[in-house]
Amino acid sequence: VQHSGRFANATLVRLSEFLSGGYKKGVRPVKDWRTSTIVAIDLMVYSILNVDEKNQVLTTYVWYRQSWTDEFLVWNPEDFDEVKQVSIPTANVWVPDILINEFVDVGKSPDIPYVYVTHDGLVRNYKPIQVVTACTLNIYNFPFDVQKCSLTFQSWLHTIDDINITLMRTPEELKEDKSVFMNQGEWELLHILSNYKIFSVDNDDYYAEMKFHVVIRRRPLFYTVNLLLPSIFLMVMDIVGFYLPPDSGERVSFKITLLLGYSVFLIIVSDTLPATAIGTPLIGVYFVVCMALLVISLTETVLIVRLVHKQDLQTPVPHWVKYVVLERAPVLFCIHKKHRLCSRLSSQASDLDHYKDNSYAGLIRMGLPPVPSRDPTPPVMDNILQEVTAIRHFLEKRDRAREVAKEWLQVGYVLDVLLFRVYLVAMVAYSITLGTLWSVWQVA
């Protein structure tokens, strides 16, 4: 066909008409129908847009490439001014129906209306795709989690006799290629694994599929600073609170303040933690256990304060408690029984004895006997002697009450030290276990 006007001597126009003449885009482009069309595909991850743990959806932006041989799009470059490749509309050529099995939504992908065709019939269809796929996301290791999501490419209709799939590059080149990945976000790309498989649904028709495993890892620095460190600081302050005197109410109010502060902290960070219907991240369990430890610490403080609280009608310490707590436990656990509070009570008791001795000596200097005699005495003297006896009984009773209080304080001090050590060991073991797990996950 000879062209005139603006199409005169237009090589591309002549080539386009040559290629489109009699071309049937609805027919698989092979001359022998027994020949399978081999589609070579390639994948490069450009960006991780969103990881939705609640809905188990991964949104990525990838550069997808596929090429195949079209036996009907072949020409001799010498007949067309040495043109060896040309771009033609995608709608005018046969395109394989290769889809991603995990697609759950149509992404905002740009429309690329052209494909490249070389003179030997090689068709290259390159396009970027926003891929919204279903993925099983395991958040147990959050924020040190590594996710592995698959993108499975296969022909939706054609069997392996019609369309087969292969890789453009070697699996090793594909695995290590991060040349186009934008790695400034929350997630970093570790590698892309590929796996070719032939499967059958009904043991009659066999299909080819190429599965790409996109392995990504979360950057944990943000969550470590905003979640783990505040919690660790509050737990350290809880341990420091044990050094407050057990017989003062300051420790109880201090522990209650820490518990309230941790509750507010959990409310603030609840929106940051990922939520799924099938599991809870370990860091969530860590927060709950820390809250439980704070409650246990407060309970222990309340019990110890109740035990050492000074009362006038406090019962004496049982003998088995004295033996176990005041004699055996200090020896086994290297606890000093003498405490400054006990020393203060002892000094107060010594002052009481000194006061009693001085009182008795004063009565004697006044000429009043400490015990009533059998000689008849005037009524006024009888009243004075009764008052003195009552004072002596009262002082002896106060002395016994102080001794009981001092023993209970010693018991409370020993129990407080024992419970504190048990609490500290439990917290250290828990922290070492979690720290080891998170360290292993981060370097894995």
Image: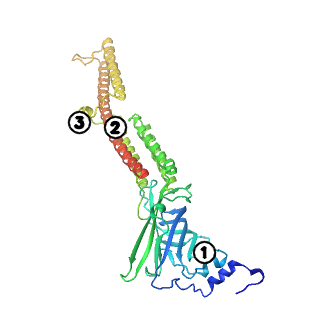
Secondary element at image label 1? strand
Tell me the CA gap for discs 3 and 1: 88 Å
Q: Position of residue 365 (x, y in %)?
A: 32, 11
Query: Label 2: how many residues lie within 10 Å, few (<14), some (14-19) or many (20+)?
Result: many
Q: Is residue 105 visible?
A: yes
Secondary element at image label 2? helix
Q: Which mark is residue 288?
A: none
In the image, residue 215 sits, relative to residue 161, either above or below, namely: above
Secondary element at image label 3? helix
Q: Position of residue 224 (x, y in %)?
A: 48, 49
Q: Amino acid at mark 1?
A: Val
Q: Amino acid at mark 3?
A: Val
Residue identifier under label 2: 416
Tell me the CA gap for discs 3 and 2: 14 Å
Q: Position of residue 44 (x, y in %)?
A: 53, 64
Residue identifier under label 1: 115
**Which badge, 1 or 2, comes first in the chain's sequence?**
1
Residue identifier under label 3: 324
Question: Badges 3 and 2: C-beta atoms under 8 Å apart?
Answer: no
Q: Residue at x 56, y 82 (%)?
A: 72
Q: Is residue 299 visible?
A: no
Q: Amino acid at mark 2?
A: Asp
